[in-house]
Amino acid sequence: MRTADKQIADILVRYGEPFGGNVWRVQGTAVIYHKTLERIAAQAGIAFDPPTLVRAERDEAVILVTGRLPGAKAGTERVEWSIGEALVNVNYRVSGKQAGYVYAMAEKRGKDRVILKLLELHGLVYSEEEADEFRQGHPAAVQAVEDDFDGADPFDAVTEAEADLKRRIDERTSIDAVTDLMLEPETQRTLGQMPPGTRDEVRDYAKARLVALGWPPKKPGRRAA
């Protein structure tokens, strides 16, 4: 399991959130659900100051967001701030007749960045709202994602086999269940048909799920029984 993934998993477990099912990768970048960050912020007691509008246009919004995390001792707290921005057809794509909610998107992005800073996850994982490719590279998106760049997909497509296996991993609620799934002959055949990079990604995903379920990695020098 990647060291960064282990750091992410350890922090998520602290707030009762599993790595598997909450985090995925787009072009090698770890991405987390906005709703997961909201749940963690509520549990951690993070409070936000009223946002400050830096730029307000019809198709663009830039918002300054400040958040506060209570400290272990009364009267102590950590304070972080960040900028959330959304500009239609630049970093916020709106298709067809869909309305563009630039202010809501800018606020989400700003809050998510502040939460990640307060949790000391900034730089390790990004919010799904950070950019459209993160949101459209969602692991549940089994079919190829539509794009507007001359037919070129700007992010990694998630194959049906990979998405299905990750979903099955997420459905397992015990260490033994995840282990049994990965050892099944059908699973091994599926893994054998995947490119090496994808196969390693699925295995890392399963290991992260095990860690989230409480599986302790072996200590250096410890021999298996």
Image (cartoon, helix red, strand yellow):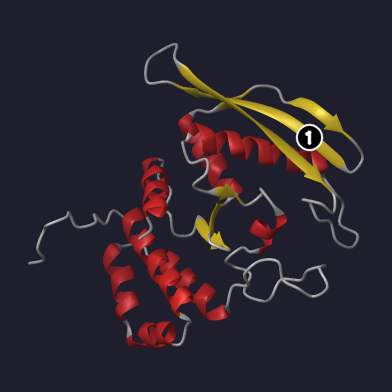
Q: Amino acid at mark 1?
A: Val
Q: Quadrant of the C terminus?
A: bottom left
Q: What is the secondary structure assignment of the residue under circle 1?
A: strand
> Number of labelled discs?
1
Above or below, 8 against 155 in this view is: above
Question: What residue sits 63% from the left and 69% below the top?
Answer: 141
Single out the residue that lies furthest toward the top: 75
Is 200 placed above or below 213 here? Answer: below
- Give coordinates of residue 26: x percent, y percent: 58, 62
Quarter of the image holding residue 114? top right
Quadrant for residue 5, please give it.
Answer: bottom left
Quarter of the image for the N terminus: give it: bottom left
Q: Could you say where residue 32 lies in the image, as x and y percent from the top left?
A: 55, 51
Residue at 80% x, 38% y is 103
**Residue at 40% in and 43% down:** 11
Q: Residue at x 47, y 83 (%)?
A: 194
Residue placed under numbered mark 1 in the picture: 62
Q: Position of residue 133 (x, y in %)?
A: 68, 59
Q: Left of 147 or right of it: where is 126?
A: left
Asked whether 181 or 148 is in front, the reply is 148
Within 10 Å of disc 1 (Cα), the crowding (few <14, some 14-19, many 20+) is many
